[in-house]
Image (spheres, grey):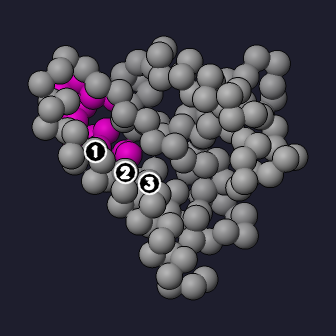
Amino acid sequence: MARADLSHQLSVNTIGPHHLIRTYLPEKLKSSSTIYCSMSWAEGSAFAPMPAYNISKAVLNALTVQYALSYTDEGFTFMAIHPGWLRTDMGGQDADLSVEEGATAVWEMVSSCTQTQNGQFMNIHIPGSESYTWDIIPW
């Protein structure tokens, strides 16, 4: 694993979301409730041959949990979501879902999320799918 690749993946997938949260958190503390969703990846803690990407997503999951623990009393919900295997440049044309299907499923999850999802890594739900069942993903 190249050092530059790890630095890039951590910058994009972990440090970037952290800076985004820290930037908007003071304003959001004034609201009664806020939901923050990080886009993770179900294979991010497993054995796919993309070590820098996997590490960055595992760190993102840990960051999400730490924010969830820190801001529960303020009514915040922080969760990581697996948006599905999407047909993108990274996912390829053989992926399960279109970007639109994945985005719709993420929006449905965010719209119906409750405090019980705080700190969790959640799988999207696609009706009739055995892969996308709105489960908690262990990591």
Q: Nearer the viewer, mark 2 or mark 3?
A: 2
Residue under label 2: 17
* C-alpha span from label 3 to label 1: 12 Å
For the residue carrying disc 2, how many other residues have a C-alpha within 10 Å: few (<14), some (14-19), or many (20+)?
some
Q: Which residue is mark 1?
A: 21
Residue 76 on the magenta segment = yes
User: Foreground residue, 126 or 95?
Assistant: 95
* Element type where label 1 sits in the image: helix
What residue sits 37% from the left and 45% below the top?
Answer: 65
Which residue, given by chain and number where applicable, does mark 3 sit on?
Answer: 60
Q: Is residue 133 visible?
A: no
Q: Position of residue 103 (x, y in %)?
A: 61, 29
**Which numbered disc, 3 or 1, marks the residue closer to the eye?**
1
Above or below, 81 against 112 in this view is below
Highlighted magenta segment, given as a residue range: 64-77
Q: Amino acid at mark 3?
A: Leu
In three-dimensional space, the C-alpha distance between marks 2 and 3, rounded to whole angstroms, equals: 8 Å
Q: Which residue lies at the image location 64% right of the left edge and 47% below the top edge?
A: 42
Whether residues under marks 2 and 1 lie with C-beta atoms below 8 angstroms apart, the answer is yes
Distance Cα–Cα, label 2 vs label 1: 6 Å
Mark 1 is on which residue type? Ile
| Secondary structure beneath label 3 | helix
Left or right: where 89 falls relative to 52 = right
Q: Are marks 2 and 3 in contact (CB under 8 Å)?
A: yes
Q: Quadrant of residue 26?
A: top left
Residue 2 is situated, as x and y percent measured from the top left of the image, at: 57, 85
